[in-house]
Image (spheres, rainbow, N blue to C red):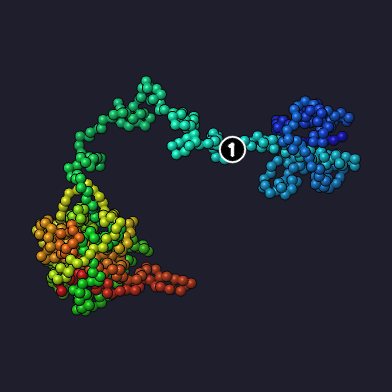
Amino acid sequence: MLVVALRFSSLSGFIHSVWNSGFQMSSGLLTPKVPANLANSEEFWEVKSKTPGRTKPGVTGCPLSSFAKGLLRVKPRPASYWTRAPSITQHLRLPTRHALGAETRQNGRRRFPQRAVRVAAGPEAHGEEEETAGRMLALQRAPKRAWRGLLCGQRRSKGLYGPKPHRGPLPRTPLTVRGPPPGAPLPWYLRKPPPVREQLPELDVVTYQEKMYFVPWLAKPASFPEWERGWHDPRKHRSPPAREMPAYKEQPCFLCNPRSRLQEGVKQALWLTKTKLVEGLPPQILHIMNDTAHEWESQDERVQNAISHALFWISTEELTPAENYCSVLLEDLLHLCRMMTAKYPSLTKRMVAQDHKVAAAWQRESILLQVRGSYGKILNATSPLQPIASKDEILATENHTLETFYPIAPTIDLQEVNVYEIKNDTGFREGYPYPYPHTVYFAPHSTKSKRKPEHLRAQMMMFAFGNALAKAKGLYGDEPRILDEPIVVQSVGTDGQCFQFLVFQLNTTDLDSSNGVKNLAWIETDQLLYEDARSCPEIKKKVVVKPAGIHGYHPDTFKKFLAFYLHGIV
């Protein structure tokens, strides 16, 4: 007698497995649902009942498919594959992770719960034991395979619950030839349902117009009158359209402000200001710089102390932000220059102004340009600087040809506006005791918008030109002309380590045409005050490679800075 014991979690699980595997159970029999003429075939099997001599193959049912035949087809295996050791009573473990071999171990998970089959076998039932074990293994795998077959037509990726993507030809569009012809209705999946108000025009829309305030779950009224406060609130001010403003003009104006960054740098600034560039500093500045009589004792030590104060002493942080130490360094260097007042009393006729606003307008080849804004510091004096170039050198600029940068527009990166006022103002009221601009100082106020040295030099030239032009129009009027006494304005820019020096001489206010007399500019670029400064030493392999402090100090840079300050006095 052959006894087969299966361990299932519940009776419903056993019935579900038998039903999905294509078997039926009646009167102690477990047989496949096959026709009577196929019951004796080798592709199907049956389990003997408890009563010897009684065998009932499944007569009812339908023919099996090729998929079911493949499930029930068993490959014979030796007895050693199913049993641990030959004995009269053997406990067979079917199919577990250890018994299924390398194929199941590669998957890394237990696919079936552990089941035990107890077989009482004798010498004559040894061959039947192998066949029964194989059939039981196929029986256990059948529900899983059948369930997988049902899932073959479904998607297991994203969007499992949505409609399947369209696999047919694309709909007809103006760019394709497939799809419905022009004028024909679109397929259902391309039609857009009309709004609810079009479907039901008689529907009353509930809005928040009567409540006089916004309600999220109510509709927006078609015409909602704006609420008037009855007084002017600057925080809720709404400017009228540009064309309704009184300062609106049809001709656009291009503004250069402190935030402007000229793409072409100095080349673009030379064209906008009608200026000829001269490399190096003028001889008047070099003469003051090379004269040792304009120095004081321990000058280099004091300058290095000023650098240390700006970089290390004003903050407990390891790295001081650039917007902090640049302004402090510039103020400390100006303080050192003011120490020369005891030697040159005329320096008392100077005054430094912070964040003053300048405005100047001019025409350049029928293009209206303006320089406006507030920048760093400006040093004013009671008397103007003397011209750098002689009259012969000024007249020689007529033969100079300005360099263009076609196809780039000369107004690139300038702000284009239609609401503006033409204004020429030095930023100081009439009667100010220091009316003449002397030197303009630039230092970055923020590290968020870093500027390249080329852009800084272009901005220095534009604002030095703007201060000179505003002063020239205040002295000689708005009519374009060649100035009898050219106006000289200096400019110094720094990022805390590298200095840029500029001297600008305004010779003419006739800037519309590129012909005639041109202005002059002298530039000294990229002058390092020091090469490196660190608050902590650089250590590699427990060896101090570079100690803390200032390294690579260049004394000539401060000499040029001092010469710009003393120019006009010495």
How packed mark 1 is, by other alpha carbons closer than 10 Å (few <14, some 14-19, many 20 or more), is few
Q: Name the residue located 15 percent from the left edge and 55 percent from the top edge.
A: 425
Q: Nearer the viewer, residue 514 or 151?
A: 514
Q: Residue furthest bottom?
A: 292
Q: Please give left or right for residue 473 compared with residue 124 in the image.
A: left
Q: Is residue 296 visible?
A: no
Quadrant for residue 344, please give it.
bottom left
Q: Nearer the viewer, residue 160 or 414?
A: 414
Q: Please give left or right for residue 510 compared with residue 157 in the image.
A: left
Image spot of residue 32 (x, y percent): 77, 31
Quadrant for residue 261, please give it.
bottom left
Q: Please give left or right for residue 1 compared with residue 441 in the image.
A: right
Quadrant for residue 131, please give it.
top right
Is residue 48 positioned above or below 322 on the image?
Answer: above
Q: Report how many numbered discs are placed on residues in the image.
A: 1
Q: Name the residue located 59 percent from the left edge and 39 percent from the top edge.
A: 156
Q: Name the residue located 16 percent from the left edge and 51 percent from the top edge.
A: 422
Q: Is residue 543 visible?
A: yes
Image spot of residue 564 (x, y percent): 20, 70
Q: Secondary structure at mark 1?
A: loop
Q: Please give left or right for residue 119 compared with residue 447 in the image.
A: right
Image spot of residue 348 (x, y percent): 14, 68
Residue holding disc 1: 155
Q: Residue furthest right?
A: 124
Can you say which quadrant of the picture contains the C terminus? Answer: bottom left
Is residue 189 positioned above or below 248 on the image?
Answer: above
Q: Nearer the viewer, residue 88 or 195?
A: 195
- Callout 1 amino acid: Arg
Is residue 376 positioned above or below 419 on the image?
Answer: below
Q: Name the residue located 74 percent from the left edge and 31 percent from the top edge.
A: 64
